[in-house]
Image (cartoon, rainbow, N blue to C red):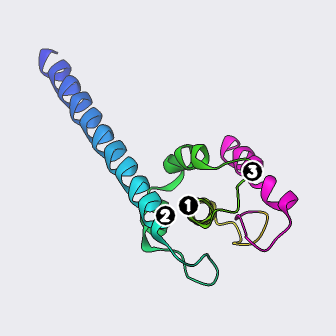
Amino acid sequence: MKAVIICLVITFCLSTNVVRAQDHTLKHDIKNLVDSAQKRTKLWPWKPAGPEVAIVAAHGKVAAPLLVKLLVAQPDTDAKNLGVQQEVALALCEIYNVTKEAGHIYMNRTIRKTNNRIKKFWEVKVGGQ
């Protein structure tokens, strides 16, 4: 009986450490996505998504709540910020297998009303998982 309890405690400790490591890796990957997106000089779709989008998307739905927190309700026209918003939304599109189009991704050549609905779209989508 003691051996079983010891095994359970060890297993719990190891799994907790794995979860912490995965969480650290996810946050690091999201930071890399943001840093890279801020350096972009062209917006999507004129320039394909950076490789960081696929790296973050590979984490799956566990990444979604953190990504949604990065979205803004009303993106400004600052290309640096819009690039970050696009990359975050592109990662969410990959995670949820959603079409990459206006209404799901912030676009610089769409009406403001469309962009202003994107954060709410993702909040509902991620909240319903």
Magenta highlight on residue 36: no
Residue at the disc numbered 3 = 74
Quadrant location of residue 76? bottom right
Residue at the disc numbered 2 = 38
* Relative image position of residue 121 (x, y in whole percent): 76, 51
Q: Earlier in the sequence, mark 3 or mark 1?
A: 3
Q: Which mark is residue 58?
A: none
**Which three-letter amino acid code belongs to the residue tagged 2?**
Gln
Q: Are marks 1 and 2 in contact (CB under 8 Å)?
A: yes
Secondary structure found at label 1: helix
- 124 is higher (above) or lower (below) than 116: above
**Residue 25 appears left or right of 50:** left
Extreme left residue here?
A: 3
Magenta highlight on residue 106: yes
Q: Residue at coordinates 53% horizontally, 75% vertically from top-left? A: 49
- 128 is higher (above) or lower (below) than 36: above
Quadrant location of residue 36? bottom left
Secondary structure found at label 3: loop
| Magenta residue span | 104-129
Q: Residue at coordinates 39% horizontally, 47% vertically from top-left? A: 27
**Which three-letter amino acid code belongs to the residue tagged 3?**
Gln
Secondary structure found at label 2: helix
* Relative image position of residue 56 (x, y in whole percent): 45, 60
C-alpha distance separating marks 1 and 2: 6 Å
Placement of the N terminus among the 4 image quadrants: top left
Residue at the disc numbered 1 = 84
Quadrant location of residue 99? bottom right
Extreme top residue here?
A: 2
Q: Residue at coordinates 73% horizontally, 47% vertically from top-left? A: 73
